[in-house]
């Protein structure tokens, strides 16, 4: 009886979906992308697998930052935030092996995640796998390319405000203006939040017993940030246009100046041999962290013939991080520069349509980097990298395409390197199959080469190492997809082998005794001396499955799942035997199982449009090489948006519930938290959009 009832529904469903707006379906299931090949393709026709998060998905989820968007709307990416900052894991490895681009341009600096307004994003393109042949160093695990939305209307102005508990506020203002051949694009973003803590205690051990003491150190630090982007563009004709752009970003923490915490001291009674424990209250913080970034750039596009497109881009990115002291025993309040970095990039690229079945992308790229650090006593260190790259897209036969790419890199410190990639793409009707192999290459950062570090509470001193080697990998990927005008389903598998991974190596007592400088540090009380070294390697294997379904009457459902098995071989020192051992663990901060679910309903009644969304993120245990496993968790959100189109103005209030089931990680402070979400919260938003 059930089969008889379901058969008519199955027959009618495609017909009902086809009746929907074709433009909406095409945009939702088959957007235009550029990441992966550097040339424009419909997503279903891209020779390289690229996942897309659309502007609509971002708006429906009511996310306030790029990291939150990636954590909520994908399963390949997980995010962990603690007192040291926010860490992103992509396909089983850290974001050190991931490249972040804005409109194809590399972002650098510790604040690179926060310098793009969510409301100004047209789409996010996610390429899984090594892509050094096209994008250079760091593209070992993948590439995230944020494409911003530049309106072509005479005037577009948007104001979006989002408010949640714990003082969380996000304000976006975008103003785009076009008159004739001139366009101006401006965006401003302000974000802030208060300190919060789910568990106000830290744990100490008295022998085999656990003792809890109050702590004023927050799980999530208060902060304020402001970000301004400006772009001016002139289109002289259909063959030539130029642009200039700039960005200013300012971020500062707002720690509780009265916060305190406890330290534990253990003494042994000489007569009884009994251990005694005493606790001392100390001021938690004496400074705030202050980051400032500015970047400038310019470029041009010239189309001398219909088969030749030439691009020239030059930009500079400057980052400064400082300790903003408000109390010190030595001086008045002052600002001490922690580090300053500068990144300069010049790229000349051409896309050449050689014939109907062959498209070549080739170019030259020059990079310069520099580092200053007062805390590390680095006056100035710098390096440069020269690149020559080419990638050829070839239609072999009808339905079968191939991609072959190669990059030659010369780095001032690490010499020459060649990274190849190759991919095959077969498609027939709605079915698509892709298989690819690529090699990745990552040069050590200037901080890894030259920086030292002192951790007084643990008596640990880290020395620099200028003899580091570049990290390399081999990445295999296979993908199978099917899509039609109401359904998209796919499965992907990958293997990533990374070698020469950089980690901390503790020096043996023999090495310390043989080096006067190290011995002096040891005699000064630094009981653990270590340096960065190429001592690790990892193998990560993963499989992802995804489904997107457009149903009748404005309903849509999507879900995805990622399984990631990572194994890292790490060299560790046994201090008793003074011998190095090789241990095998999951990769630090990796998660084995992640699932995502989303259900959306859109409907319009005249000038009123309603959108409702249920969003769920389910995550297994996260591994930490320091703290062990964080517990698994899941978070479900419900969001609604109500839009009223009034001639040239659209008013869109929104209301929803973040973390519906009030899931929190109540572990003691300084744990490997599964989530820092403070609990159930109402989210209220308001968007005003004017266009002419």
Image (cartoon, rainbow, N blue to C red):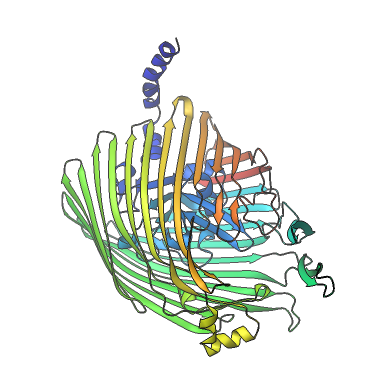
Q: Quadrant of residue 500?
A: bottom left
- Look at the picture and state if 460 lies above or below 279: below
Tell me if 683 is positioned left or right of 620 in this view: right
Residue 217 appears anywhere in the view: yes
Q: State the count of labels.
A: 0
Q: Quadrant of residue 105?
A: bottom left
Depth order, front residue of 284/456: 456
Depth order, front residue of 238/97: 97
Q: Quadrant of residue 212?
A: bottom right
Residue depicted at 64% across the width and 66% down the height: 252
Residue depicted at 36% across the width and 26% down the height: 18
Q: How far from the left and from the top, in percent, is residue 613?
A: 55, 35
Residue ranking furthest to the bottom: 516
Depth order, front residue of 230/593: 593
Residue depicted at 51% across the width and 56% down the height: 88
Q: How far from the left and from the top, in percent, is residue 290?
A: 62, 70
Residue ranking furthest to the right: 271
Quarter of the image that includes the N terminus: top left
Residue 649 appears anywhere in the view: no
Residue depicted at 61% across the width and 62% down the height: 225
Q: How far from the left and from the top, in percent, is residue 457?
A: 68, 73
Q: How far from the left and from the top, in percent, is residue 171?
A: 61, 53
């Amino acid at each position: 009886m059930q089969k008889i009832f379901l058969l008519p529904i199955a027959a009618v469903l495609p017909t009902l979906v086809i009746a929907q707006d074709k433009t909406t379906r095409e945009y939702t299931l088959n957007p235009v992308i550029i990441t992966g090949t550097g040339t424009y393709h419909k997503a279903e026709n891209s020779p390289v697998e690229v996942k897309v998060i659309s502007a609509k998905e971002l708006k429906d989820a009511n996310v306030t930052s790029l990291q939150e968007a990636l954590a909520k709307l994908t399963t390949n990416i997980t995010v962990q935030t603690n007192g040291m900052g926010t860490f992103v894991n992509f396909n089983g490895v850290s974001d050190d092996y991931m490249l972040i681009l804005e409109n194809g341009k590399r972002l650098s600096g510790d604040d690179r995640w926060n310098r793009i307004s969510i409301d100004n994003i047209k789409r996010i393109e996610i390429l899984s796998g090594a892509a050094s042949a096209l994008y250079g160093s760091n593209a070992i695990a993948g590439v995230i390319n944020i494409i911003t939305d530049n309106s072509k209307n005479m005037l577009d102005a948007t104001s979006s405000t989002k408010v949640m508990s714990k003082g969380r506020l996000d304000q976006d203002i975008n103003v785009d203006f076009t008159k004739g051949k001139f366009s101006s694009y401006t965006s401003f973003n302000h974000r802030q939040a208060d300190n919060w803590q789910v568990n106000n205690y830290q744990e100490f051990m008295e022998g085999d017993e656990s003792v809890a003491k109050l702590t004023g150190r927050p799980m999530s630090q208060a902060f304020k940030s402001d970000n301004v982007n400006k772009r001016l563009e002139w289109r002289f004709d259909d063959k030539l246009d130029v642009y200039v752009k700039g960005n200013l970003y300012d971020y500062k923490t707002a720690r509780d100046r009265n916060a305190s915490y406890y330290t534990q001291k253990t003494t042994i009674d000489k007569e009884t041999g009994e251990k005694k424990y005493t606790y001392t209250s100390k001021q938690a913080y004496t400074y705030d962290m202050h980051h400032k970034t500015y970047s400038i750039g310019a470029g041009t596009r010239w189309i001398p013939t219909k088969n030749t497109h030439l691009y020239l881009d030059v930009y500079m990115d400057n980052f400064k991080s400082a300790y903003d002291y408000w109390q010190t025993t030595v001086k008045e309040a002052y600002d001490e520069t922690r580090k300053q970095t500068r990144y300069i990039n010049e790229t000349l690229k051409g896309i050449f349509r050689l014939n109907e079945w062959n498209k070549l992308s080739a170019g030259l790229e020059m990079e310069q980097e520099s580092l200053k650090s007062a805390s590390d006593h680095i006056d100035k260190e710098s390096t440069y990298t020269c690149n020559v790259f080419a990638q050829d897209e070839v239609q072999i036969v009808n339905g079968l395409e191939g991609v072959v790419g190669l990059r030659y890199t010369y780095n001032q410190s690490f010499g020459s390197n060649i990274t190849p990639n190759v991919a095959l793409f077969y498609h027939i009707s709605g079915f698509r199959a892709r298989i690819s192999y690529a090699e990745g290459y990552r040069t050590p950062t200037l901080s890894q080469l030259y920086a030292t570090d002192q951790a007084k509470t643990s008596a640990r001193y880290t020395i620099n190492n200028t003899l580091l080697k570049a990290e390399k990998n081999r990445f295999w990927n296979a993908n199978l997809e099917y899509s039609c005008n109401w359904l998209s389903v796919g499965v992907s598998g990958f293997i990533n082998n990374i070698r020469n991974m950089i980690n901390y190596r503790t020096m043996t007592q023999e090495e310390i005794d043989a080096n006067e400088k190290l011995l002096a540090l040891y005699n000064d009380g630094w009981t653990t001396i270590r340096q960065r070294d190429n001592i690790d390697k990892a193998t990560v294997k993963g499989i992802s499955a995804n489904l997107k379904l457009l149903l009748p009457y404005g309903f849509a459902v999507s879900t995805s799942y990622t399984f990631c098995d990572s194994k890292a071989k790490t060299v560790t020192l046994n201090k008793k035997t003074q011998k190095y051992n090789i241990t095998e663990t999951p990769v630090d901060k990796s998660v084995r199982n992640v699932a995502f679910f989303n259900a959306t309903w859109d409907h319009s009644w005249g000038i009123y449009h309603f959108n409702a969304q249920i969003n769920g993120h389910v995550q297994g245990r996260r591994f930490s090489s320091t703290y062990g496993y964080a517990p698994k968790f899941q978070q479900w959100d419900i969001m609604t948006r109500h839009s009223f189109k009034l001639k040239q103005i659209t008013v869109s209030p929104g209301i929803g519930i973040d973390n519906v089931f009030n899931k929190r990680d109540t572990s003691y402070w300084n744990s490997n938290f599964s989530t820092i979400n403070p609990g159930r919260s109402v989210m209220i938003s308001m968007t005003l959009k004017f266009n002419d």
